[in-house]
């Protein structure tokens, strides 16, 4: 086992987990959009089985959720002014 590279193995596992998380989230977003349900961190966490912490910690996932959530808003209110650019 002299040729075993633990670091490379751990990086490979992390890449697989990240890909799996992205796939789960993407599928969950598609399902929520198809049934016209609101997209937010809670609903996406429940639908995808991915923890809210993971959703917040992946910046590209977080930005996508925030973008979709803003798109779903009908009328601007003082509560959602951060979505207006």
Image (tube, rainbow, N blue to C red):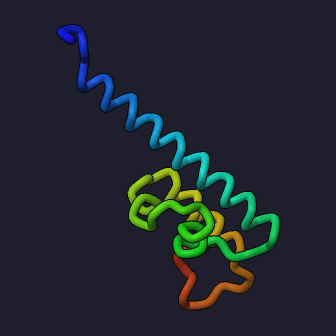
Q: Quadrant of the C terminus?
A: bottom right
- Tell whether 72 sits left or right of 77: right
Instruction: List the single residue furthest toward the front.
Output: 1
Q: Viewer-proximal residue, 55 or 78?
A: 55
* Towards the viewer: 81 or 64: 64
Task: Name the side, left or right, on which 62 lies relative to 65.
Answer: left
Where's residue 42, x and y in %? Answer: 53, 75
Q: Residue at x 30, y 23 (%)?
A: 8
Rendered location of residue 18, percent (x, y): 46, 43
Taking the view exactly as shown, the residue that stands out farthest to the top is: 3
Please report the residue visible at 81 percent of the width from the left and 65 percent of the height from the top.
34
Q: Most extreme residue toward the bottom, as rendered?
A: 78
Q: Write down the quadrant of residue 69 in the picture.
A: bottom right
Q: Is 81 on the left or on the right of 32, as rendered?
A: left
Q: Is 56 drawn above or below residue 36 in the view shown? A: above
Q: Report the front residue among 12 and 62.
A: 12
Q: Quadrant of the N terminus?
A: top left
Residue 34 against residue 60 in the figure, above or below? below
Image location (x, y in percent) of residue 31: 74, 62
Residue nearest the observer in this picture, 42 or 13: 13
The quarter of the picture where residue 65 lies is bottom right
The tally of labels here is 0
The residue that appears at 39% across and 28% down in the rendered structure is: 12
Q: Please name the residue shown 73% across and 75% down the image.
A: 37
Looking at the image, residue 80 lies above or below residue 15? below
Residue 36 falls in which quadrant of the image? bottom right
């Amino acid at each position: 086992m002299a040729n075993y590279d633990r670091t490379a193995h751990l990086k490979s596992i992390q890449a697989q987990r990240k890909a799996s998380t992205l796939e789960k989230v993407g599928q969950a977003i598609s399902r929520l959009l198809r049934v016209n349900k609101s997209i937010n961190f809670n609903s996406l966490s429940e639908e995808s089985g991915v923890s809210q912490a993971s959703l917040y910690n992946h910046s590209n996932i977080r930005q996508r959720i925030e973008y979709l959530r803003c798109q779903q808003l009908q009328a601007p209110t003082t509560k959602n002014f951060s979505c207006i650019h």
